[in-house]
Image: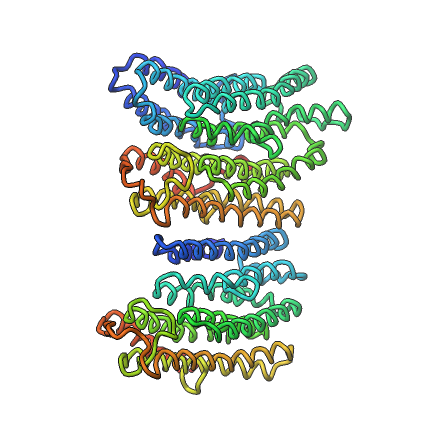
Amino acid sequence: MLKIIIPTIMLMPLTWLSKKNMIWINTTTYSLLISLISLSLLNQPSNNSLNFSLMFFSDPLSAPLLVLTTWLLPLMLMASQHHLSKEPLIRKKLYITMLTMLQTLLIMTFTATELISFYILFEATLVPTLIIITRWGNQTERLNAGLYFLFYTLMGSLPLLVALISIQNLTGSLNFLLIQYWNQALPDSWSNIFLWLACMMAFMVKMPLYGLHLWLPKAHVEAPIAGSMVLAAILLKLGGYGMLRITTMLNPQTSFMAYPFLMLSLWGMIMTSSICLRQTDLKSLIAYSSVSHMALVIVAVLIQTPWSYMGATALMIAHGLTSSMLFCLANSNYERTHSRTMILARGLQTLLPLMAAWWLLASLTNLALPPSINLIGELFVVMSSFSWSNITIILMGTNITITALYSLYMLITTQRGKYTHHINSIKPSFTRENALMALHMTPLLLLSLNPKIILGFTY
Amino acid sequence: FQLFIGWEGVGIMSFLLIGWWYGRTDANTAALQAILYNRIGDIGFIMAMAWFLFNTNTWDLQQIFMLDPNLTNLPLLGLLLAATGKSAQFGLHPWLPSAMEGPTPVSALLHSSTMVVAGVFLLIRFHPLMENNKTIQSLTLCLGAITTLFTAICALTQNDIKKIIAFSTSSQLGLMIVTIGINQPYLAFLHICTHAFFKAMLFMCSGSIIHSLNDEQDIRKMGGLFNAMPFTTTSLIIGSLALTGIPFLTGFYSKDLIIETANTSYTNAWALLMTLIATSLTAVYSTRIIFFALLGQPRFLPLTSINENNPCLINSIKRLLIGSIFAGFFISN
């Protein structure tokens, strides 16, 4: 694991010491190389986790998420090049340093062995993200967004600290490997109910759960492109990952404690999808679509069947790639019209047909077209929720329909129809942008051929 | 699972192709409408898949048929919903007339012969399960009967030539569903094959007419094409005759057999009556097309360049024409 962490830390001195015209090239190239190293982790020979040290390990659940994280850093760097082009050199380097710091903390979080270290790193990822959103965001609302983001997450995760410390006292260790063997059933008592709640709330806020999702649209909309990408793709998955890890300890209470959250997720899924249909702001639409997909993941994790875990992990990876791509596309619109309103940049298919092709692919994967991994994730989740209760299929089905509708609505509004008369002064697509989209789409398409890797540890 | 991939795939292709002329707002809304109704049907499909997974532990058709589960109401209902969405049956039908915003070859391929029969095809594939379930059979029968009558009546009042043919497609699809409902999946399949020929040809002819009249689609503004476009006229008349099931053209072999079987089987009398009325209405609206478009005095502008010289068009219509006349004979013998 140090093979990945130390190079990522070393990216920081790389940016500060590079020459002015080489910073982007250096950082992007080296981060791509680091992501190649992380691919080797995907080769998991046995059912147990690959143990590398006392502090870091990787197993079939965290390996895909790790690869996603390392894959996204070069993409984030490529995406940020335009809006930082007019900043002074020091600020560019500072931005890249923030991204790299975030990346290091994320890698360490996904590979942490001990739950307390996971918690510390989980909280620590908030800091660079906050700095990125509030310093380099584009509108004045970014301060409010940062506030919401920070305090929602903190409020949710402080009880987690208390819970982890108490579990440490009770069972003597919080090491993942050991917990597998020490697993005792939690007896049913009031304090244990609060323990369950304390453990779960942090991740529910992070996911986010429908009632606690207010921070997400603000944060996504106000963040600069790299911030949105990393938020949508990775930080939300931290919540899912944490939930998947912690629920192994929390049985059997989950069977009845999960009901209110399941109901909230099922209903919230439909609600947020419907809100998407009425959005005028493009990034806000993608943000709400993220909430909707994550609600599916919450449902999957709370049902706790092998199929649902497979669906949850597949959906997390798929959604990470798709949402990140959609944010990049929205950003390409934003850079041209300097506004996020959808109808200001319509009829793009006539002018930028290749970009229209990427829009089409992104929308199709967003609505979970077979055989993409988005579909596999959603399908598994729908199947397992059908087995949990037959009636959920109605809600899931409604969600699938509405998802299809808003994805295509977004596509039609931005691409089709007659273009506006003020649009003839936009710049054509850059190679960098096309490369960015291709790099998002290629893993998605390749994974559709062999989704075994991302199906998690219950395959 | 593979069926589902193809199923969704055609839905998306339909979306893309209907919205081919994407500068046109109507086309875009029609495409979105198509996806909406298709998706609602897909919920049924997914529900059936989920049920099969948990009760027969497989998505493999052969294994499902071997296991022969009881109480198949729920999945068959799901599959029926899927077919309703995809094949534009009564509850989920409006997308098919709106889909006429697409170019004519698109309509000829997707919305007459291949894609819309996907729903019927699904039901045919699952017919071993449907044989045992009387409720679902009656439901299919009534659904098909309502569809065929309703859309046939709608076709009578339309003035756009493509919409008339679209409603006629919907009506024929209802007929296919009726055939499945009386437990004759093979006949339904035969009707799919034969119907493909003459419906595609009708669409291509109408496309030829529309193109030569400079994008005029309203039949009240056509007329007198009988002498101006002889080849198109011939194929249109033969196509309409085949559609109505005139003896010894293609439609006869499938359509007449369906009507005979429906008459002689122990089935819902009301559904049967509606099917018979709808079949007679087929003749009515086909004649209406012929009357308005071909006969009488020309009602279009005098300076249009009517030509049938395009060999691509003529060759394709020629082949479909031969198919319309002979295919029924060859398939059933």
Pick the front one: B5 or B112: B112
The answer to whether B211 is drawn above or below residue A241 in the figure is below
Residue extending furthest toward the bottom: B247
Q: Position of residue B14 (x, y in %)?
A: 41, 57
Q: Which color scheme is applied? A: rainbow
B37 lies left or right of A138: right
- On-image quarter of the N terminus of chain A: top left
Residue A44 appears in the picture as rendered: yes
Q: Is residue B200 above or below residue A91?
A: below
Horizontally, is A95 left or right of A258 in the view? left
Q: Residue at x 36, y 74 (%)?
A: B221
Q: Is residue A113 visible?
A: no
* Residue A207 to residue B6: above or below: above
Residue extending farthest to the right is: A189
Which image quarter: residue A16? Answer: top left
Q: Residue at x 54, y 23 (%)?
A: A149
Horizontal and vertical percent position of residue B274: 59, 78
Number of callouts: 0
Residue A224, above or below B320: above
Q: In which image quadrant can residue B200 be found?
A: bottom left
Residue B296 place in picture, x, y as percent: 35, 84
The residue closer to the viewer here, A285 or A54, is A285
